[in-house]
Image (cartoon, rainbow, N blue to C red):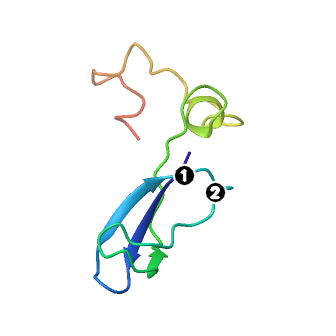
Amino acid sequence: MPIYEYQCGACGHQLEKIQKMSDEPMKDCPECAKPELAKMISAGGFSLKGSGWYETDFKNSGKKEAPAPSSACGTSACPAANS
């Protein structure tokens, strides 16, 4: 269930409330009891876990792996050092 943030237009009180998406929005402020509560717009946080997401499954698809370094690399006979 999402967490909604509210702010009272009368007294400025802010609160968070866990509600179902189908629940009616809160209207009455728990501090001053006036019907001045309004939902605030805030960034929702979530994370994607498990297999099937870009980072774990598809990041390298279609790319060719770089050739393994020659055993001669690391010495003056390394072809990469001579180019």
Compared with 42, 1 (above or below) is: above
What is the secondary structure assignment of the residue under circle 1?
Answer: loop
Image height of 45 relative to 70, above or below? below
Q: Which residue lies furthest to the bottom in this view?
A: 10
Q: Which amino acid does label 2 sit on?
A: Asp
Q: Which residue is drawn at 53% across and 51% down?
A: 2
Q: Are marks 2 and 1 in contact (CB under 8 Å)?
A: yes
Would you identify the image quadrant in which residue 32 lies?
A: bottom left
Density class for disc 1 (Cα within 10 Å; few <14, some 14-19, many ≥20) is: some
The N terminus, quarter of image? top right
- Image quadrant in which you'd find residue 42: bottom left
The reply, left or right, for residue 10 in relation to residue 44 is: left
Give the residue furthest to the front. 33
Q: Nearer the viewer, residue 63 or 30?
A: 30
Looking at this view, is 31 or 41 the one in front? 31
Q: Distance between the residues labelled 2 and 1?
A: 6 Å
Residue at the limit of the structure toward the top, as seen here: 71
Q: Which mark is residue 23?
A: 2
- List the residue tagged with mark 1: 19
* Relative image position of residue 8 (x, y in whole percent): 37, 78
Please name the amino acid that badge 1 sits on.
Answer: Gln
Instruction: Work out whether 33 lies above or below 43.
Output: below
Residue 57 x %, y %: 64, 30
Q: Dot 2 lies on which element? A: loop
6 w.r.t. 80: above or below: below
Q: Where is residue 29 in the image (x, y as percent from the top left)?
A: 39, 72
Disc 2 crowd rating (10 Å Cα; few below 14, some 14-19, many 20+) is few
Quarter placement of the C terminus:
top left
